[in-house]
Image (spheres, rainbow, N blue to C red):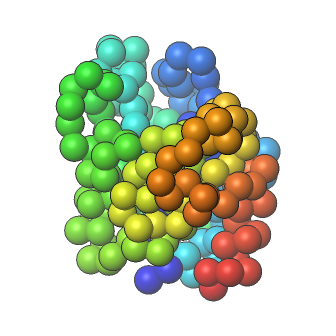
Amino acid sequence: MKLVILGRDGVINHHSGDAIKSAEQWLPIDGSLEAMVKLSRLGFTLVVATNQPGLARGLFDLDDLEAMHFKLSDMVETRGGSIAAIFYCPHGPDDDCSCRKPKTGLIDAIEVEFDVCAEGAPFIGDSLSDLQAALAKGCQPILVRSGRGEQTLAQLLSESQAGLEKVLVFDDLAAAADYIADHFG
């Protein structure tokens, strides 16, 4: 199985300062859906791993989240691709759960669900927590400049954290997908 793990907000869809609270607010970044379709058609198994603290904060409910994820899946499917699964952490940053990135619980759940080892799999994110989770599981961390990516890149350049030299940087999901198609196929 050729696994690709994707963050959601800032990678696939536009990031909001607070939270995306409804399917109506959920808007894809130009080229992101097409990039997912490309990878899907090339035989990659696409799985989304996303922190959703807005659930814990009461900004939206599970029905709202499911409507957002249905919209995402439907938009990819109508273009000829597929998303194998969407895993999310419903907790806030102070809940000390094992599934909130940068912890690896979401990736652990992906490994169990698909009976696969995520080591070496591309993990595309826009935040430091995405990159840290990827590194902790031995995934290939990929940073996109979309969403919070520029801020994360500035943070990476100002800090020296172990493993971050392994991070690949691309403008957006479309550019990252082109690289993955050429180097992970």
Quadrant housing the N terminus: bottom left
Q: Is residue 55 above or below residue 112?
A: above
Q: Is residue 15 left or right of residue 95?
A: right
| Pick the front one: 184 or 80 | 184
The answer to which image quadrant residue 99 occupies is top left
Residue at x 55%, y 76% (from the top left corner)? 44
| Pick the front one: 43 or 120 | 120
Q: Residue furthest front?
A: 160
Quadrant housing the C terminus: bottom right
**Is residue 54 in view?**
yes
| Pick the front one: 151 or 45 | 151
Residue at x 21%, y 26% (from the top left corner)? 95
Give the x, y percent position of residue 3.
47, 73
Give the x, y percent position of residue 150.
72, 36
Q: Is residue 44 left or right of residue 138?
A: right
Give the x, y percent position of residue 25.
60, 24
Residue at x 20%, y 36% (from the top left corner)? 97
Q: Is residue 19 above or below residue 174?
A: above
